[in-house]
Amino acid sequence: MPNTPQLTPDSQFPDLALKESVQKHPPSDMLGGGGLVFTWNIASAADSILPWGRNVGARDRQLRDFWPTETYLAGGVASVSFRNATLDWEIRGGSDRVVQAVTEMLQSAIAGDTFGWVPFMEKFSQDLYTTDN
């Protein structure tokens, strides 16, 4: 075995293990699907989306259609949206009747064709992070 590490009496670690402990990261052009490729896809898609401030409704539709098509972007938006939907919350202040009414209102929020706080917060987060209006 040519690369078999040898322990010496005065050494605690083999020389080969020390040499292999240094991490070498591959250059960005060697990364499959990440780094520059992601940036390039986002940059090229930006050319086809209306500029900010012009026809806000159409731009929001374009942005809403675009973000799920980019894997990394969709993963990030979904992760943050799920996290936001699972955060604990509590209404405080006012009378107990007001607190109870507001809590029930938020727990029964409507998000498109779904009902409840979690789907409402997921849809709200996705709209907040992926559109302008």
Image: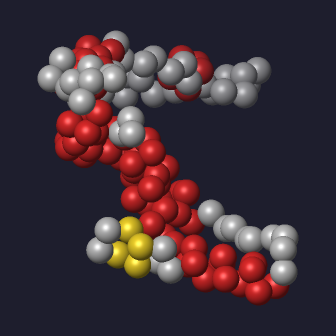
At horizontal 35% and vertical 75% (from top left) the residue drawn is 114
Rendered image coloring scheme: secondary structure
Give the camera-side residue of 128 and 23: 128
Q: Is residue 63 visible?
A: no
Q: Position of residue 72 (x, y in %)?
A: 33, 38
Question: Picture coordinates of residue 60 (x, y %)?
Answer: 28, 39
In the image, residue 82 above or below residue 92: above
Residue 10 falls in which quadrant of the image?
A: top right
Q: Nearer the viewer, residue 82 or 107?
A: 107
> 9 left or right of 72?
right
**Residue sitting at 49 percent across and 62 percent down?**
121
Is residue 29 visible to us here? Answer: yes
Percent coordinates x, y for residue 119 in the rendering: 42, 69
* Above or below for 19 versus 133: above
Whether residue 91 is situated above or below residue 96 in the rendered picture? above
Closer to the camera, 105 or 31?
Answer: 105
